[in-house]
Amino acid sequence: MKKVHVIKHPLVQHKLTLLRMKETGTGEFRNLMREIGTLLGYEITRSMPLRHTEIETALGHRMKAPILEKNKSALIPVLRAGNGLLDGLLVLLPTAKVGHIGLYRDVQTNTVVEYYFKIPSDIRTRHAIVLDPLLATGNSAVAAVSRLKELRPKSIEFLCILAAPEGIEFFHEHHPDVNVYTAAIDEKLDKKKYIVPGLGDAGDRLYGTH
């Protein structure tokens, strides 16, 4: 899968195991998600452009040194669970602008309903990173990216902690141009559309509402 990047760094995999564990409490789960967000953020920002600028070091030497181009990122968490990854990315990209997309599944029609959409006004000049811990069925991810594409950001990438094969397939049927970054691809979805072995409902575990 050319557009899927599985981050197998030992720290990522260790923290993912702790996230999966049933006995991991709300506070620890929240901290782990933030830390994984930072670690995954290193990978998704790997191709950020650099330029060279002349500086003077603390020893008085002048040199040409690499520095990031002006940060033109936009972090877009999908509410509510996507907020669990946001702070981890902001550690790396403190000047990034932040938007939010609120979605829920209508159990009667089994469709995704948007209830909130607030995106930076200059999104066309920015590289958007959509944040959602789980790519399960892919319905919410597809809806979020489709809505975002209407505003034509410079690029879009999708960051999650866990993905199901079914979700990846469905997502790329609709958005074959969007890279997916994840810590693991699990076995499958169960009858209730949960990722298995998975880590449970990320939003409920993040906020203690399970």
Image: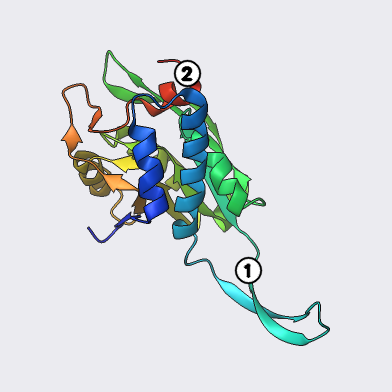
- In the rendered image, the vertical position of residue 205 relative to residue 148, given as above or below: above
In the image, what residue type sits under mark 2? Gly
Q: Are marks 2 and 1 in contact (CB under 8 Å)?
A: no
Q: Picture coordinates of residue 44 (x, y %)? A: 45, 57
Name the kind of residue labelled 1 in the image. Answer: Glu
Q: Estimate the x, y position of residue 144 in percent, counting from the top left.
A: 41, 38
Query: Measured from the top left, where is residue 186 in percent x and y?
Result: 23, 41
Drawn side of residue 161 relative to residue 167, left or right:
right
Quarter of the image with the C terminus in it? top left
Q: Nearer the viewer, mark 2 or mark 1?
A: 2
The total number of labels drawn is 2
Using the rendered view, name the quadrant where residue 131 is placed.
top left
Residue placed at 21% from the left, 45% from the top? 169
- Which residue sits furthest right? 60
Q: Choose between 25 and 133: the one closer to the eye.
A: 25
Q: Determine the residue positioned at 72% across, 86% down.
A: 63
Helix or strand or loop: what does disc 1 sit on?
Answer: loop
Task: Please name the residue that numbered disc 1 is placed on.
Answer: 69
- Label 1: how many Cα within 10 Å (few below 14, some 14–19, many 20+): few
Residue displayed at 48% across by 27% down: 80
Mark 2 Cα shell of 10 Å, populated few (<14), some (14-19), many (≥20): few
Please name the residue shown 52% across and 35% down the image: 31
Residue to which mark 2 is pinned: 208
107 left or right, relative to 99: left
